[in-house]
Amino acid sequence: MSRLEELFRDRSKKALLMPYITGGYPDLHDCRHVLEAFIAGGADMIELGVPFSDPLADGPTVQASAQQALDAGVTPDDVLALAGEFSGRLPVVLLVYYNNAFSYGSEPGPEQFVAAAAAAGVAGLIVPDLPVDEASEFVDICRGRGTDAILLAAPTSTKERLRLIAGAASGFIYCVSVTGVTGARTALSGQLPEFLDRVRAATDKPLAVGFGVSTPEQAAEVAQLADGVIIGSRLIKMVGDAGDIDVACRAVTKFLQEVNEVLA
Amino acid sequence: MTIPVRFGPYGGRYVPETVIPALDELAAAYERLRDDTDFKAELASLLKDFVGRPTPLYRAGRLSEKLGGTTIYLKREDLAHTGAHKINNTVGQLMLAAKMGKARIIAETGAGQHGVATATAAALFGIPCAIYMGEKDIVRQELNVVRMKLLGAEVIPVSSGSRTLKDAMNEAIRDWVTNVENTYYVIGSVAGPAPYPAIVRDLQSVIGREARRQILEAEGRLPTELIACVGGGSNAMGLFAAFLDDGVRMTGVEAAGEGLDTGRHGASIERGERGVLHGSLSYVLQDAYGQILEAHSISAGLDYPGVGPEHSFLHDEGRVRYDSVTDAEALAAFTMLSQTEGIIPALESSHAIAYMVKHSDRFTADDLVIINLSGRGDKDVHQAARALGIMS
Ligand SMILES: Cc1ncc(COP(=O)(O)O)c(C=O)c1O
């Protein structure tokens, strides 16, 4: 059983809290403060994004955060280093688009990126544009390095595909709450319970729900159905809107504490 | 035969899980329909009476003479309805969309030719349609923006990234991920996730099938060389596909923009690396970390940092040669063809002409060349006039 799977198994709360931030947002220095705010707010693990030039699974909020980080010169190496700084304190998972993983290092292919992530103590990798059919090499490499390959399941996934995803994924299964891209939403999809039932029927692995979760009320709903809650766009917006990093971090911590209460 | 997912190592389906079932559905529908007698008959009839096919294979006598006597034929895709080869693909894909019962059409466009062709086919089938177009392209291809709107399409400006074709395609994919249950995504080149590269190649291969028959009729022999410009690569694949098993030399011409060494170009095969963009593994312009670079070309249709996966395969196999010409060379060819043959070519197609002009001394009088004239230049006249100093 992997480190992440144990964390889910041994949890004392209904669902684990996984806040997301784009690595190097709002800049490399202040991103550390945001991560500290995540920890102060009660994060059980951290999801850190490698900013990519063409993030086609992301809505405007995450896109803009990635662009800001890239404009400031943030590289995958910077994000790996950041992950390394925090991975001793709590599990860090990286969200990386496949081309950043594929192009990393001297040879094409994901081997060197996975090795670097494992060396940085990264507990798992999420690749939003690597569906299970394309993932077998990647999954094998992750297994060899002791890092989880966290695959995504979508409401459109068929029973057959959910079975494949469950067979290949480790750590947890990232359940995309909506048919769509990332971004804060006012309400959860009415189809979420039915979707999660279908995923449960395919696997015993933990399920975490992301894409659109943006309030404590929504987190509470998710906690009834799943084992983990991922919150991203809402937090990025809080950081961006605050203007001042200290104000932003206080708001983030307070918000996550509120979420944590409903997850208890 | 099943529809290929890969061409050698290239291709694949590197897109979010959300749309994979839709790609499966599309592949299954296409596999079922492509050999269906009624489907084939309906497509043939639309290509004939709506698109105006076959397009002529025209012997460009004055150009041949001017370039040293090599016999040069132009495959006149500029004479297809809407003025470019793009319509061959969109009519076929709209037929698929209609048969699959899709209620909404989306597409990306660079030069606007694919957008116009999609809007046209959507109007023909009575299905609402939205076209994503980069803000930079909206300015330089204004005529096509007006055409799309007249055809009833919604044109959605894209302001992210380089504000060109690449970003329009990102945005179209995001729309598709969001609305996949009722929306059909019409990809405009032999790019994107499988099965699109194969579907678009098949639908465009009518160009090469006609050209092959026409050249045999006119000259009694196969051509010695085929030349086509390569953006995503659909007009080139369309011409090449019918000749791949013959000994015919083939050249794909990419955009060298301001020069390959300036970094401002669109030569993905000549100067790119293997990478994943828009759902397929292919040659891509990118930095050492895999961040996609902005392409540059005077022609919006070649202003793209990627290329269809089958071209990457044909390049590695050595079956097709890839070369490039600059903005300035393309512009000179644009003028030359206009004044030598009375044909104003698209700036994209001008790259193919320019290759012939540039290398005419490599050809002999025995050579027989077909250049794909992928589109007409009406959309480009303002931009060309400014670049040539005819208009301020
Ligand atoms: C006239 C014309 N030729 C060529 C292209 C390039 O596309 P492809 O390489 O797919 O043929 C375009 C694209 O907009 C075009 O409009």
Image: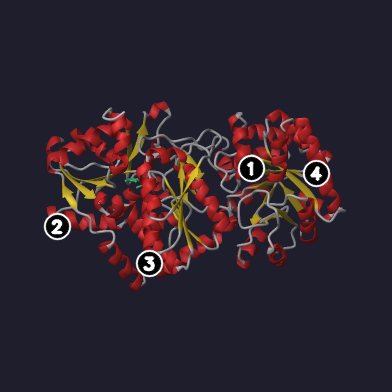
Left/right placement of residue B166 relative to residue A254 reads left
Quarter holding residue B117? bottom left
Query: CA separation, marks 2 and 1?
Result: 59 Å
On screen, A136 above or below A256? below
Residue type at mark 1: give it. Answer: Thr
Q: Chain of mark 2?
A: B
Q: Chain of mark 4?
A: A
Q: Which marked residue is nearer to the observer: mark 2 or mark 4?
A: 4
Front residue (pair A248, B216): A248
Which image quarter is the N terminus of chain B in?
A: bottom left
Q: Chain of mark 1?
A: A
Secondary structure of residue under mark 1? helix
Residue B217 tag number: 2
Left/right placement of residue B42 relative to residue B157 reads left
Residue visible at 63% across and 42% down?
A: A62
Residue B287: horizontal and vertical position, in percent?
A: 52, 33
Residue type at mark 2: give it. Answer: Glu
Residue A255 tag number: 4
Front residue (pair A75, A224): A224
Provide the residue designation for mark 1.
A61
Residues at marks 2 and 4 on the same chain:
no
Residue B142: horizontal and vertical position, in percent?
A: 37, 42
Provide the residue designation for mark 3.
B34
Secondary structure of residue under mark 4? helix
Secondary structure of residue under mark 2? helix
Secondary structure of residue under mark 3? loop
Residue B148: horizontal and vertical position, in percent?
A: 39, 51
Q: Chain of mark 3?
A: B
Query: Is there CB contact under 8 Å for labels 2 and 1?
Result: no
